[in-house]
Image: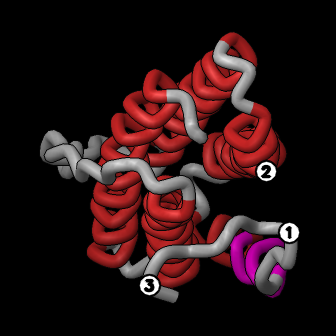
Amino acid sequence: MTAPRFAEQLNEQIGNEFAAHQQYVACAIHYDALTMPQMAAFFYGQALEERDHAMMMVQFLLDTDCAVRIPGVEAPKTDFSSIVEPVELALAQEKRVSEQIFALTRTAREENDFAAEQFTQWFIKEQVEEVATMNDLLTVVTRAKDDVNAIEEYMRREQGGEGADPTAPPVAGA
């Protein structure tokens, strides 16, 4: 049985993941409008990942016979003053999500909810990867902010091709 306090927090996290999804769509649109297709594709992909994270959480709640509540989210930031700003925002967002996942893990431990704690472990691994990716991207975009082609070439060369993670939790509806 999933601890009620964990289920409540996980429902909140579903909203956080959907908010991250929308924010990444807004970042992608910003780069699409600047005719930066590699950056746009990267952020559209990140948006889909965040949506899938939310749906993994939905599936966990369904699998553990908990109520699922999809909270509303605030509108994302859509106006950016530079090509660097969306990546800065993305890095801050990933760091914030990491803290939220850590809080979920703490709650699972405090409640002796071993299944919930095991569920959060995949997300911890994922957040380490996401923060590292955004850190690297921020370094590249900051260094090459006056050379859009260099940024696009980096994205073409370095991103993508990872494939599905066989250890990922199941996605509801997939």
Comes first in the chain, label 2 or label 3: 2
Q: Image height check: is 3 above or below 138? A: above
Residue 20's spot in the image, x, y percent? 39, 49
Distance CA(mark 3)–CA(mark 1): 18 Å
Q: Which residue is mark 3?
A: 173
Left or right: residue 142 compared with residue 17: right
Residue 99's spot in the image, x, y percent? 60, 22
Q: Which residue is mark 2?
A: 122
Q: Nearer the viewer, residue 161 or 147?
A: 161
Q: Image height check: is 123 above or below 102? A: below
Q: Image height check: is 5 above or below 65? A: above
Left or right: residue 168 compared with residue 59: right
Q: Nearer the viewer, residue 57 or 78?
A: 57
The type of residue carrying mark 1 is Thr
Mark yes or no: residue 143 visible: no
Left or right: residue 75 compared with residue 145: left
Dot 2 crowding, Cα within 10 Å, few <14, some 14–19, many 20+: few
- The magenta region covers 155-162
Mark 2 touches mark 3? (CB < 8 Å): no
Please tell me which residue is depicted at 46% across the width and 55% down the height of the picture. Answer: 65
Tag 3 secondary structure: loop
Distance CA(mark 2)–CA(mark 1): 8 Å
